[in-house]
Amino acid sequence: MRRFLFFLPVLLGTTMVSAQPVYETHDREGPVFSDMPGPGAKPLSLPPVNLMDGVPKAPAVAAQPASAAAYTYATLQIMQPQDGGTMHSNTGQIDIVVALDPTLRTDRGDAIAVKLDGTVLPTKRVTPQFELSPDEWQMAGRDQDEHQLEVAVVDRAGRALLISAPVHFFVHRATRR
C-alpha cells in the first residue's frame, strides 16, 4: 500500500505533463513551439498520441528430449557485414562472420549455406568465418549498390536446420573519372 501511495503522485505528475498544451509562435527562422504561452502564441490542437502494440511474443516451444536438444542449434546471426553497413570491394571478395550457438557440428555433416541476393551459392562452409570469392560474387551478386545476405545451417541432405535473419549491406567499388 505504501508503494502505491508513493507512485500515485508520480503517475499523476506524468499524466499532467503529457496533457499540457503546446503553443506556437513565429520568428524569422520559422515556427517555435513551447509549453509556455507568450506574446502572439497560439495554442495548437494536437492529434491523439500514436500508440502501437508491442511485438507479439513467440509461442513457447515444447521441451525436447535431452538427446535431440543437444543437437539443436539455438542462434544463428550474421555479424559481418553489418546490417545497413558499407563495404568497399572492387572484386566482390567479402569477409563474412557468423555467430552460431552451439558450434557447427561438422562431424554430423552440418555446414553453412550462403544465399546472396536470392541465389544460394553452391559452396557450403564449415567455419563461422569465411570469404565470398570474386567468382561467387560474379555468379550471384546483383549489379547494384545494395545487397542481401542470408545464411543457414544445413544438414548432410541440405535441409535447413536454422536460417539467419537477412542482412542488407552496400558495396562500393572504386571508379575512374
Image: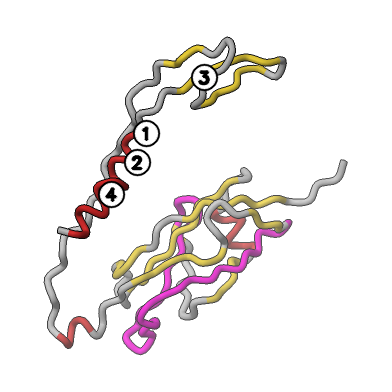
Residue 111 x %, y %: 40, 76
Frontmost of labels 3 and 1 is 3
- Callout 3 amino acid: Pro
Is 65 or 159 nearer to us in this picture? 65
Q: In this view, does 92 lie to the left or right of 100?
A: right
Is disc 4 surrounded by few (<14), some (14 to 19) or many (20+) residues within 10 Å? few
Circle 1 residue: 18
Mark 3 to mark 2 CA distance (whole Å):
20 Å
Circle 2 residue: 14
- Callout 2 amino acid: Thr
**Residue at the extreme right:** 177
Frontmost of labels 3 and 4 is 3
Circle 3 residue: 37
Is disc 1 surrounded by few (<14), some (14 to 19) or many (20+) residues within 10 Å? few
Residue 60 x %, y %: 15, 64
Residue at point 70% right, 58% down?
A: 89
